[in-house]
Image: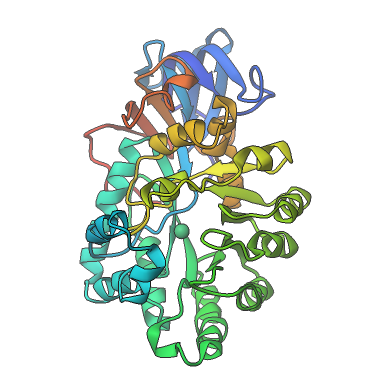
Amino acid sequence: MKPATHPTLLVDSIGCLLTLDPDLGDGPLGIVEDAAVAVAGERILFAGARRRLPAPYREAETIGAGGALVTPGLIDCHTHLVFAGDRSDEFFARLAGRSYEEIARSGGGIRRTVEATAGASDEKLRALARSRLDRFLAAGVTTVEAKSGYALSPEGELRLLRIAGSLGHAVSVVPTFLGAHVVPPGFAADRGAYVRVVTEEMLPRVVAERLSGICDVFCDEAAFSVDEAALILGRAKGLGLEVKLHADQLTGNGGAELAARLGALSADHLERVSDEGVAALSRSGTVAVLLPGAVFFLGKRSYPPARKLLDAGVPVAVSTDFNPGTSPTENLPLMMTLAAVELRMTAEEIWTGVTTSAARALALKDRGRLAPGLRADLVVWEAARPEEVPGRFGGVAVRCAVSGGRPFGMGLDSRGASH
Ligand SMILES: [Zn+2]
C-alpha cells in the first residue's frame, strides 16, 4: 500500500511541541512553540511551527491541543508484560526483612510467577496483558517492550511470545525472548542442560517462527553467569537476533562489559556497574536502561550511577521494568520523577530517556521523535511545559494519545487496533 500523502489528522494549537529532533526545533529536545503536527495514515506528514503548516493540511480532522504540551508517545523499553498471579505479599515480606534472594530460594520470586502463568489460559493472559496496556496508554506510553521468561520451557516461552505479539492493542508491543530468565528448578543440578535447551531448542524456533527479533538474558548470581549469558547471546547473534541483558543488578559481575563486547542494544539495571563497565558502554554505544522503580520498590538505596553514565556519554533510557515482583507499575511518568530525584537526571535527559534512547534500546528507527515519515505516535498532555510531566509526582496528565495515527482519548476504546 502506498503511504497516504493527504492529511488524515491534524493536532493543532500546540503550545509547546517536543519533536526530539534538533533539526526541527530548539535545543536537544527540538522544541517548537505554537506548533502543529499533521498526520497521514500511520505516519507524520508535518511537525513544526503553525505558521509553516501548508494550508490544505488545515482541512483534516483536528484535535485542538489548546496550548498544551505535545510530545512523542513514550516508549517503555523494558517490561515483563505477560504473566498471571500476584506477589504483593512478597513486598511486605521484604519490608519485614527478608531479602529478594531469600524469597526466591524459598519458592517465591520468578518461579512463583512461572507456576501461576502455567496455570492460566491464553485468553486469561491476553486479558491481563491488555488491561495493563490500557494503563500504559493512560500514562502516555504508546510502545511497550514485552519479555517472555515466565514459562522456562520451549512450548511455554513460545506461547508467551505469541501472546505478546498478538494483543491487538493501541499500544505497540515489541516481544523480546527471555528464555534465560532463571534456571528452572528441574535443571538445578545441570545448568548446562538448560542453557542447551535455550540455545538449541528455543532460539531456533523463536527465529523460525519470527516471534522476536531480540534475545535477553538475566545475567546475575541468582540467574545466569557471564559465561552462560555469553554462550546464549552469542548463539542468538549467530541466528541474526539483536541482544541485550539484565546486567549488574543485584551483584556486579561484569554484565556491562559483556554487553559492550557483544555490541548489545542495551544493558539494563546497572545498579552495581563498575567504572570499567561504564567506560566499556561508552565505547560500544550500548544504551544503559535504568529502572529506578525496581530499586525504589525493593526498598533499596542502590540507584544506578546515572550521572557517571551520562557524563561518560552513554545513552541512557528510563523504563518501568513492569513486573509482578520488583516493579508492579505501568506509570512511566512516575519513573521520570524518580529519574529526576534519585538519578539526578535533567528534564532534557529524562525526556530523551523515554523517547529516542528507549527507541534505540529496541532498535526502532521509526519512532521516538516527531519528524515527517516517522510513526505518528504522540501525546497531548494536561501540561504546558516538559518539566511538568516528571514534576507531577505519581500523577498522570494525559489528555489524549495518538498511536499509529489513531487518536485515543482517555476512556475511549483502545482495543482492536492492528499492531
Ligand atoms: Zn527486567
Q: Residue at x 65, y 78 (%)?
A: 231
Tell me: residue 78, above or below residue 333. below
Q: Residue 336 vs residue 107: left or right?
A: right
Q: Quadrant of residue 338?
A: top left
The residue shown at (64%, 75%) is 239
Question: Taking 297 as reference, is 125 above or below it?
Answer: below
Measuring from the top left, give residue 13's x and y in whole percent: 43, 11
Location of residue 345 by image quarter: top right
Return the x and y of residue 45 as percentages of the image width and height. Answer: 55, 28
- Closer to us: 96 or 159: 96
Q: Residue furthest top?
A: 51
Q: Quadrant of residue 101?
A: bottom left
Q: Position of residue 217 (x, y in %)?
A: 54, 68
Q: Is residue 89 above or below residue 205?
A: above
* Most foreground residue, 85 or 7: 85
In this rendering, position of residue 324 left or right of residue 340: left
* Residue at image coords 61%, 64%: 243
Rendered position, 300 above or below 8: below
Instruction: Name the residue at 28% across, 71% down.
Output: 117
Residue 133 pos. (x, y %): 32, 48
Q: Nearer the viewer, residue 189 or 204?
A: 189
Q: Residue furthest right?
A: 283
- Colour scheme employed for the rendering of this structure: rainbow
Q: Is residue 43 visible?
A: yes
Q: Is residue 19 visible?
A: no
Pick the front one: 252 or 53: 252
